[in-house]
Amino acid sequence: MTALATFTEELQRVLCVVAHPDDMEYGGSAAVAEWTSAGVEVSYLLLTAGEAGMRDRDPNEVAPLRAAEQRRACELVGVSDLQILDLPDGLLQADVATRARIAHRIRQVRPDAIMCTTWQLETPWGLNHADHRAAGLAVVDAIRDADNPWLFRGQLTGDGLSPWATKWLLVNGAEPTHVLPLSPEAVQKGIASLAAHQEYLAALPDHPTPQDLVSGICSEGGERAGLEHALPVRVFPM
Ligand SMILES: [Zn+2]
């Protein structure tokens, strides 16, 4: 296996777009910790509140609980800009309405790079969730939409926002082309940010510990590039 190259583009702003609270916390947030410690501004856009994610708890109770856990997870990796949309958890679609919401946020944040999770059905850890597939596909399309001056000019995305061209898409969980090197501190923050989803994780049967899970992802990523710790990502120039 040839070693993966390091992604070395200089970034000022990164927007992370995922379906649920906790989706960034499987390695992605360790990269976020590395960026924020270097002064990169990072924003999170969650498409749903993850309200249908706990079998024994009512969605009305779960949505604020998971938002609070996500805010804590964000604080731990230096992110204060968190937006959670009200699209339906479990029933997310990569439709025009979802694309418009994402494109709107892209035009507001004006990121150099966007991080999302893989839209593939089959992943190394099993069959991917419907919302994750929809979120990834909607991000791909919304990046193009956001740069098209003729799309979403109405009230859905607000008047007066200029088109924006995102340069890079970084996909977490897909067959990687690059790695994002991580310091041991960033890995520790990444572990802590997953652990912040305390009640959610406690409700999952047989969930591995955040320590084992995140350090495993980051060590394996490091091995692919001859580094101690790294997050493997699939990079698309847009
Ligand atoms: Zn998820």
Image (cartoon, rainbow, N blue to C red):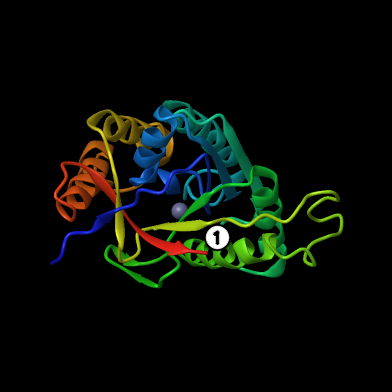
Q: Quick one: 213 or 206, which is closer to the camera?
A: 213
Q: Which residue is drawn at 71% across and 52% down?
A: 104
In the figure, 230 relative to 121: above or below?
above
Q: Quick one: 200 or 215, which is closer to the camera?
A: 215
Element assignment for label 1: loop
Q: Residue at x 28, y 46 (%)?
A: 207
In the figure, 187 relative to 23: above or below?
above
Residue furthest bottom as drawn:
121
Residue 116 shows up from this direction: yes
Q: Which residue is drawn at 70% across and 68% down?
A: 96
Task: Say left or right for 235 vs 137.
Answer: left
Q: Position of residue 128 (x, y in %)?
A: 40, 66
Quarter containing the N terminus: bottom left
Q: Residue at x 51, y 51 (%)?
A: 113
Disc 1 beta carbon < 8 A from ligand 1?
no
Residue 92 shows up from this direction: no
Q: Mark 1 points at which residue?
A: 90
**Amino acid on which disc 1 is placed:** Gly
